[in-house]
Image: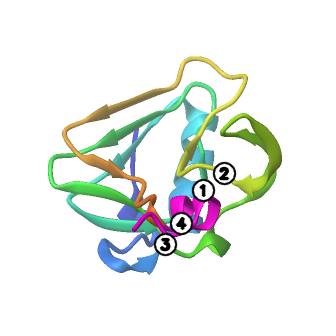
Amino acid sequence: MRLNIKEYGAIGDGCTLTTKEIQQAIDDAAKQAATVIVPPGTYLCGSLFLKKGMALELQKGAVLLGSTCLDDYVIADTRFEGRTCQWPLALLNAQDIEGVHVYGEGILDGNGIPFYTDFWGNPA
């Protein structure tokens, strides 16, 4: 089974936050051992949590673009650069699971400069 994120309301304009829509597709895919399809377009999002048994296909021309707003990411205790702290989780997250596949010709763009700047200061 293939679940297209556009059918969940995701808008690929690079401006509209689509985290909730994509996460709902991921949650549904995990229940059915299905593949989440990210079609061509730029989908702005925060933290996404992959689930056991599902797949994520980024089609050619598709971009999962990390939001530059740190508030769009789940904050959790994590180790970052050798220290434990409360920090925004990644764009794609998977922990203690197996059978997850991420593939395709699309792009994962974490858009990490705001995180770098927040943690280390201005790199200039």
Residue extending furthest toward the front: 124
Give the magenta-colored segment's residue range: 114-124
What residue type is disc 3 on?
Thr
Q: Is residue 6 left or right of residue 41?
A: right
Q: Are marks 2 and 3 in contact (CB under 8 Å)?
A: no
89 shown above or below 30 = below
Label 1 – label 2 distance at C-alpha: 6 Å
In the image, 54 versus 102, the foreground residue is 102
Q: Nearer the viewer, mark 1 or mark 3?
A: 3
Q: Nearer the viewer, mark 1 or mark 2?
A: 2
What residue type is disc 2 on?
Leu
Q: How many neighbours does mark 1 have within 10 angstroms: few (below 14), some (14-19), or many (20 or more)?
A: many
Label 1 – label 3 distance at C-alpha: 12 Å
What residue type is disc 1 on?
Ser
Disc 1 on helix, strand or loop? loop
Q: Which mark is residue 47?
A: 1
1 shown above or below 96 = below
Q: Which mark is residue 89?
A: 2
Residue extending furthest toward the left: 60
Residue at label 3? 68
Q: Which mark is residue 117?
A: 4
Label 1 – label 4 distance at C-alpha: 19 Å
